[in-house]
Amino acid sequence: MITLPGDIKTGDTWDSRVPPAGEDYASLDSNMDFDEHARIVIAARSLIASYAAKHTGWKTSTDDVFAITAFDHLKDCYEKTGGSYVLYLTKGIHQPRSNPHLTLTLAEPGKHKLSGARKFYLNVTATLARGEVGEAHPTAFVWEPVQLTYAVKDKIYKWPLAAPLSMKKGDWSGLPGQRRQRAGSISSATHTERKQAIEEQKAAEAERKRQENEKRRLELEEAERKRKAQAEAETREKARQEEIKRHQSLATDRGKLLSEFLSKQKGLPKVLKKHKDALWKNGSVQIEDKGGLKGGTLTWTATTKTFGLTRN
């Protein structure tokens, strides 16, 4: 998305100072810095916003398809975020006396010099900056974008299809001091305001990343806390299950031992469940006399796993 100067990349020769043949001025207006060029490129959003292939009449040839694809990608670059293409300003305003325009290149990041890059001309027109240096003989102009063009072989595709152009050859001759001076461009917003906007954008992006990193850190901490809690719970449950198994195994072992011991005791009344429960709990239990059978005191020593019986 093209909304701030920081969204526009620069090619290696955007500030080229190679003069056109027969002229003694540079191919980039020396009175304009990148911020002012960027303002013009950003303002071209209003041109591409109205573009739609169905309104162009470009449908009949392979070249038309190439042009439609190029303009579609340029529109996406201006209006959508996260696209595959970036917009490069590869040459500043030049040919001001005959065909004032900027050169833009649409390409994947870092590939604006390759054959697959798409080159557009952004035609501009100049309006007098009255009030800047006086009403009668203004010496500065404001360049504004009016049309985008794209060439396929020998055919030039334009959007908008028609555009007003002023300050072309012949419009300069009557202006004092302008015969050899390039037209300066004065922005409607100051450079300070634009630079501040860039800094604010950078600060906002840095804050967004900080918040994302903080959120991620908290998420990782919470995930680690849950992992540890789950591991501790699993450890406790494992220990509990092992303790249950130990008690179950112990109960089985001592039950077998008690049965073997009682089988050897002749004439002892039947040992009931209540006797066993008391035996395991207290270590001893009194077996009452019953039906002519002599009871006694039954004891259990857990450490040695042994029983004892003292008859009444």
Image (tube, rainbow, N blue to C red):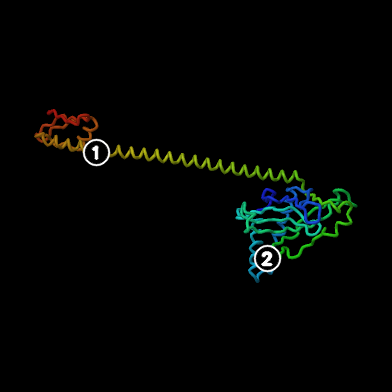
* Residue carrying label 1: 249
- Considering every residue shown, the one lying at the far bottom of the view is 60
Quadrant of the rendered image containing residue 294: top left
Q: Is residue 74 left or right of residue 99?
A: left
Q: Position of residue 215 (x, y in %)?
A: 55, 42
Q: Nearer the viewer, residue 117 or 289?
A: 117
Residue beneath disc 2: 153
Categorize mark 1 by other alpha carbons within 10 Å: few (<14), some (14-19), many (20+). Answer: few
The image shows residue 147, relative to residue 254, as above or below, that is below
Type of residue at label 1?
A: Ser
In the rendered structure, the answer to whether residue 134 lies left or right of residue 82 reads: right
Q: Name the element at disc 1.
A: helix
Q: Which residue is depicted at the point 67% across and 67% down?
A: 54
Is residue 75 visible to us here? no
Relative to 294, 199 lies left or right:
right
Where residue 276 appears, as percent x and y from the top left, is 20, 35
Which quadrant would residue 292 be assigned to in this image? Answer: top left
Q: Position of residue 55 (x, y in %)?
A: 69, 67
State which mark lies toward you, 2 or 1.
2
